Image: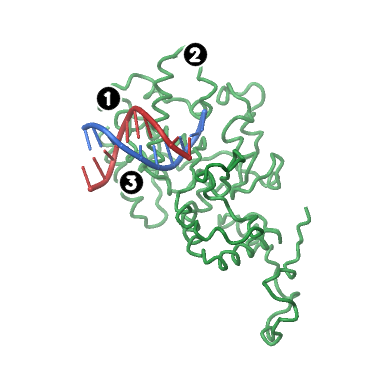
Chain colours: A green, B red, C blue
Amino acid sequence: MGEEVRITDYDVGGEDDDRVSEWEVGLPGVDDLMPLSQSLVPAELASAFSITPEPHRSMIDVNRASENTLSNIRSQSVKQSINKFNAFKSFGDDKCDEMVMEGEETVDLTGDGSDSRKLRRVDSTGAGAGGGEEADSSARTSKRPRLVWTPQLHKRFVDVVAHLGVKNAVPKTIMQLMNVEGLTRENVASHLQKYRLYLKRMQGLSNEGPSSSDHLFASTPVPQSLQESSAGGNSHVPVPIPMPYPPQMVHMPYPPPPQMVAHPAGPGASGYHHGFESHSHPFNMLMQQRDWSGNKFGSVGPYQHRIVVHKVVWSPPVIVKVTQPDVSNQLLADQQLDLLKSS
DNA sequence: TGATGAATAT
DNA sequence: GATATTCATC
């Protein structure tokens, strides 16, 4: 695609003749300005200070962002944008490796658009052609983006459930121990409901393998403490897992190359991904479709050469390293101590 | 009154 | 099929 789209032809509603030249006196010339598409932080510096580099922005992106801004101003929907931003701010860059939110591109996939409720949260990247009809959409944008349970997130979930035991694993506790910013009790409750159904199904057909529909759940083996009948109380064997989880995971700015997930160690690999095609694995699908900012790209993406870290390493068990004063983290640490003492 | 879990909706 | 939302119940 032609990346270098000139921003100078951007039309703000006036001709070039209307420009007030006095306003430009003293301003740096075009040649003096750093292109907006250029990153302000060199790659080496970003790496050294664990700064998540922003994806490369072309002039198309810059133009699009400008159009969005102006479009929002025109339609007086700035408030809506702030809500949107706040909704996504809580899923900051460093959370992207564990949480994937759908939403901004959630569109009417049926194509007919017959149901108005399906039209919510259609992003305005291509807007502007039709006119400002999105002014009344503020109420619809207050919804949270749809959470995607990545295998990493699910594993954290399973670890916590295993640690608590099925009986004690209730949404609120799970949510707290998972320590994932932005994760709601409703998210956990919904997932827990499905996970319990999965466990029940697994108990029913203990000899057979997991159903092909259990991609995500099958990707994380059911811990021993959950496979046995939930005897309840404190009879279950707690699973030693690092608790609470650190609020951030190891810096992993870009997804691992798809082939690592699809074929972890060649043909003779463990059965970790046994039973389903690589393209149908939820994590794999995500990686093939998007980078962490939600932009879509193919499996041979622009970041492929930069992908180095593919193994997520949690903080070591027992040692809870708090690098900054974090009250909630401290509370969780106390909780963990209590849990360990009581178990 | 808030949390839970099953049912239902999207 | 995955996730969100609703609602009866605790």
User: Which residue is label 3 attached to?
Assistant: A333
Measuring 42% from the left and 25% from the top, which residue is drawn there?
A223
Give the alpha-carbon distance from disc 1 to disc 2, as whole Å. 25 Å
The outermost residue toward the top is A207
Q: Is A343 in front, or is A200?
A: A200
Residue under the point 52% across and 67% down:
A76
The mark that comes first in sequence, 2 or 3, is: 2
SS state under label 2: loop
Crowdedness near tag 3: few (<14), some (14–19) or many (≥20) residues, C-alpha within 10 Å: many
Chain of the residue on which disc 3 is drawn: A
Q: Is residue A97 visible?
A: no
Q: Nearer the viewer, mark 1 or mark 2?
A: 2
Chain ID of residue with mark 1:
A
Q: Which mark is residue A232?
A: 1
Three-letter code, disc 3: Ala
Please say if the residues under marks 2 and 3 sit with CB atoms less than 8 Å apart: no
Distance from the alpha carbon under mark 2 to that under mark 3: 39 Å
- How crowded pointer 2 is (Cα within 10 Å; few <14, some 14-19, many 20+) is rated as few
Name which of mark 1 and mark 2 comes first in the sequence: 2
Amino acid under disc 2: Glu
Q: Secondary structure at mark 3?
A: helix
What percent of the width, then of the height, locates residue A343? Answer: 27, 32
**Which quadrant of the figure has residue A64?**
bottom right
For the point 36% across and 50% down, the residue is A329
Q: Chain of mark 2?
A: A
Depth order, front residue of A278/A193:
A193
Mark 1, residues whose alpha carbon is within 10 Å: few (<14), some, or many (≥20)? few
Q: Is residue A145 left or right of residue A34?
A: left
- Name the residue carrying label 2: A208
Amino acid type at mark 1: Gly
Return the disc, 1 or 3, that comes first in the chain's sequence.
1
What distance separates the C-alpha of mark 1 from that of mark 3? 24 Å
